Amino acid sequence: MKKYIILGFDMETDIGSYLKTYNGVQKGTQKILHLLKNYGITGTFFFTGDAADKNEEKVIEVMKEGFEVACHSLKHETVGEASFNMPNDSPILEEELENRLRLNREIVIKLTNKTPVSFRAPRLWQGQGQITVLERLGFKTDASYSVAAHKIQLLPYHPSEINWLEKGDMKLLEIPNFAFLDKAHDYSQYFCKNDQWPLLRLLGADFVFEKSAYVIERQSELSDVCVLLFYLHPWEFEKMPEKFQYDEGTFYFKPELYENCGNFMRREFENFVQLALNDGFEFTTCELFYDIWERSESEKQYQ
Amino acid sequence: MIYGRGVKVKNNTSNKYLVFGFDMETDIGSTSRNYTGVQHGTLAILKILEKYEVPATFLFTGDCALKNDNIVDMIHKKGYEIGCHSMYHEDLGEPSFHTSSFSPILEEELEHRLRLNIEIMQKLTGSDPISFRSPRGFGSNKLIEVLEKLNFKIDSSYMQAIHLTQHFPYFPARDNWKTAGNSSILELPLFAFDLENVDDNTYQKKLDQWPRIRTHGAEFVYKHMQPVVEEQINTHGICALTFYLHPWEFHPMPEKIQYAEGTLYYDEFLYKNTGDNQIREFDIFLDKCLSNDFTVIDFRGFRKVFEQAQVS
């Protein structure tokens, strides 16, 4: 059995579209890159078109360090089925998706001279339309599936053209974001019930590492290749505000969104990397993992 | 004169016009997913309009119309004008103040979204809407271009309190919608006060008419609109003051709203005096205006008046 970790960073405005600022992208990215280089590991950076456009030098830096630059929608819009409400978030129509993802991709290509092959949906909100457009645009991997939300798939799979939640014949490889599905513990006090996020930041490296052993155990019953796909954000590596004001009111975030952003998150992230390396995990990117997975699947068929 | 089906335009010889447009949308703009204002507030509005037998224009978002087709039907059957207000109360043009909106619409998406809005209204009313208002009054040249293409005749998105220059209805220029020009859309500016010495500075758009009927009362608005009326009559021979109101103002609104990721505490001007206070003040305001020779008219009615006045 071989076990992998994919660190996926969603490069977006602070606290995922609430704020218009990019403090996380501008300052947090540096710290993430530094850590990854220090430990000789890699990761995937999903840029919204807007984040890439307004932080060109960050895209170029990520690319030059040899990490994967991927897509995260144009403006962090809802590209699938929303699972909760936000103020003033009007959904994107399905027929508008392709144009927006094309624009996202074009902005990245302009900066990197390379066609991005991986995608992650904002808030992991997927839909059949989103999967269909990714396939049509030739994306290879989608790092959007939320195990916490959908529960069915625990391992990477090729979605069905009719029902993306089920296995099928698409070329696109769906890589699930793992969740702690064990019933022995109740995480319901946190806002994403059973989800991995934001527990690394709230509860620390030891907790997440210990719990992820159970996730790997479940996966290894089904596959020789196991993978922990993380979703993290550069804004978690910088201090974030508790509220924000605009011309119609003041929005007070739930503490889960800003608590321990900055120093604590940086330390726990580093601790987790150390624990994982010592335990024999290999770090990879979505793009590289695609080949690893396909190779292992074809070997399985050969045997 | 009988206007629409059974709605009379009173005092038709007057040269003082008030144009009322109600934005039919979710509660408190687009922060909520609820339509309690549309469901309950609309009834209060209709009751007052019927009491004074005056017309008004109701501008529906496509989403609002779909989810409240009983209200669309009721308004339509009573003969009031029905117009469009975007699909989902999205930001259609250039933002003129800071909202919590996440994803502004791309220019190339505008036409399709407004077509959807039109189609919904056609399906529910059997007729083509010709009046429009952009959510929060965010306009653009592109918006005027699309409105023309889709056969709209009247737009009421221009906020005098923000853009300052236009005081009186005008046909926007295609290359700069904030100036007068040759487009076929009649723009009805949302009038602002001249409150230099009166204003308390607590409102985002400090010269704006809105939401002062609700927050300051009918007397205040009536008194402070007089200089605007006089100025327009002196300059143009007639005056036209266009108002924007919302059904949710006629139903009690909460001070805050809870989401999965936090709580939004509204600024006071958004919920203050919503419900009975607004109903009473709007009633008083109409009474006061009608007994002082004002004519209340809807968008389409005003366009006719404006064209006739220009011809003569």
Image (tube, coloured by chain):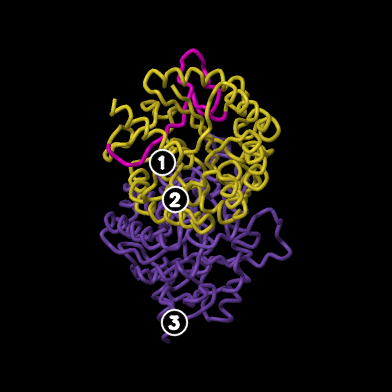
Chain colours: A yellow, B purple
Q: Which kind of residue does numbered mark 1 sit on?
A: Thr
- Chain under label 1? A
Between disc 3 and disc 1, the foreground one is 1
The answer to the question of whether label 2 and label 3 lie on touching residues, with beta carbons closer than 8 A, is no
Would residue A204 be found to the left or right of residue B8 on screen? right
The magenta stretch is: A169-198
Does label 3 lie on the same chain as label 2? yes
The residue at which mark 1 appears reads as A141
Identify the mark nearer the N-term, 2 or 3.
Answer: 2
Between disc 1 and disc 2, the foreground one is 1
The residue at which mark 3 appears reads as B309
Residue A83 in the image: x percent, y percent? 43, 35
Above or below: residue B239 compared with residue A291: below
Q: Which mark is residue B6?
A: none
Q: CA distance from mark 1 to mark 2?
A: 39 Å
Quadrant occupied by the N terminus of chain A: top left
Most common secondary structure along the magenta stretch: loop
Would residue B15 be found to the left or right of residue B212 on screen? left
Q: Nearer the viewer, residue A86 or A127?
A: A127
Whether residue A212 can be seen here:
yes
Q: Nearer the viewer, residue A250 or A147?
A: A147
Query: Residue A174 is drawn in which quadrant?
Result: top left
Which class describes the residues within 10 Å of circle 2: few (<14), some (14-19), or many (20+)? many
Q: CA distance from mark 2 to mark 3?
A: 33 Å
Q: Nearer the viewer, residue B17 or B126?
A: B126
Query: Residue B159 is drawn in which quadrant?
Result: bottom right
The answer to the question of whether label 3 and label 1 lie on touching residues, with beta carbons closer than 8 A, is no
Above or below: residue B174 compared with residue B88: below
The residue at which mark 2 appears reads as B25
Which class describes the residues within 10 Å of circle 3: few (<14), some (14-19), or many (20+)? few
Indicate yes or no whether the magenta region holds residue B175.
no
